[in-house]
């Protein structure tokens, strides 16, 4: 597992003391997942990416909350993760911000020199991107806070489906993804975060929050590990079904 974790990139952000501490107390092995997972995609809409694929410092001139090309790369990785969940019968839940009638929960704001958005651009900005858009029958939940659990029916839906494991992807790693992971762990779900499919506006925030989640609240896994997990769940269900 150590070789797998090296690819995540948090090591350069650790001090020498942190590295020594990890040798004593750092998480060495994943806690493991359960038998009935769901995939939760968090806040993958155009306002955090822009309508065009541009480097972040260009994109933020019009879309202040943009994650730039790194965000789009994570979206492209998520396409394969989402396909694997659907192919293997794993429930998919899309969560997005509620953009009308609520006060903002973050402390962010506009940027100097921001190019005003047209009403059509504002509307498009709230839409889940085409690459991972929901299929008919997939649940879409709107939230008015960072966590996908806070003030939403997500917990009730997961319990109704008998879910014991929540695999998360989306943005931002340090914000809504982390808030969701912490709340999910509080509710005693086995939590996972897919490294390549989470994204943020700054590299340090992304990598250090992956590190923190992996140490405390979740198993941070590579995309291929998550896909293999979905496939194993599907295979186990087929064996049980054939035995009945």
Image (cartoon, rainbow, N blue to C red):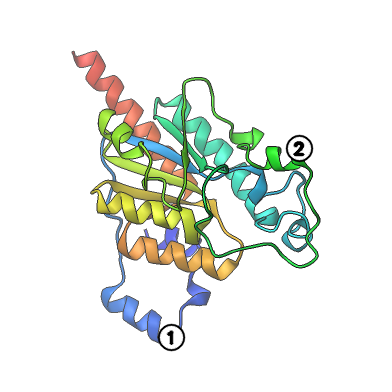
Q: Residue at x 59, y 67 (%)?
A: 203
Residue 122 seen:
yes
Q: Earlier in the sequence, mark 1 or mark 2?
A: 1
Residue 218 seen:
no
Do the residues under discs 1 and 2 have CB atoms within 8 angstroms? no
Q: Is residue 112 left or right of residue 165?
A: right
Q: Residue at x 50, y 65 (%)?
A: 207
The residue at the far front in this view is 101
Q: CA distance from mark 1 to mark 2?
A: 50 Å
Q: Position of residue 39 (x, y in %)?
A: 42, 38
Disc nearest the viewer among 1 and 2: 2
Residue nearer the viewer, 237 or 179: 179
Quarter of the image that includes the N terminus: bottom left
Q: Position of residue 185 (x, y in %)?
A: 28, 53
Q: Which mark is residue 187?
A: none
Q: Which mark is residue 16?
A: 1
Residue nearer the viewer, 154 or 37: 154
Q: Is residue 48 left or right of residue 115?
A: left
Q: Is residue 154 left or right of residue 92?
A: left
Residue nearer the viewer, 44 or 7: 44
SS assignment at label 1: helix
Q: Which residue is mark 2?
A: 120
SS assignment at label 2: helix
């Amino acid at each position: 597992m150590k070789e797998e974790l090296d690819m995540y990139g948090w090591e350069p952000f650790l001090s020498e003391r942190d590295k020594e501490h990890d040798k004593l107390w750092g998480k060495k092995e994943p806690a493991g997942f359960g038998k009935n997972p769901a995939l939760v995609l968090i806040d993958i809409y155009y306002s955090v990416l822009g309508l065009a694929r541009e480097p972040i410092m260009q994109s933020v001139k019009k879309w202040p909350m943009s994650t730039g090309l790194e965000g789009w790369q994570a979206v492209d990785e998520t396409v394969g993760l989402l396909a694997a969940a659907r192919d293997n019968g794993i429930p998919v839940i899309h969560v997005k911000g509620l953009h009308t009638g609520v006060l903002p929960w973050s402390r962010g704001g506009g940027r100097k020199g921001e190019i005003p958005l047209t009403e059509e651009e504002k509307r498009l900005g709230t839409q889940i991107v085409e690459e991972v858009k929901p299929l008919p029958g997939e649940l879409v939940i709107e939230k008015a806070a960072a966590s996908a659990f806070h003030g939403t029916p997500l917990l009730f839906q997961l319990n109704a489906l008998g879910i014991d494991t929540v695999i998360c992807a989306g943005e931002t790693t340090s914000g809504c993804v982390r808030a969701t992971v912490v709340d999910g762990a509080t509710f005693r779900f086995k939590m996972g975060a897919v490294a390549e499919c989470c994204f943020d506006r700054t590299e340090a925030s992304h990598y250090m929050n992956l590190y923190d989640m992996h140490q405390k609240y979740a198993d941070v896994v590579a995309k291929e590990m998550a896909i293999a997990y979905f496939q194993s769940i599907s295979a186990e269900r087929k064996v049980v079904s054939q035995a009945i």
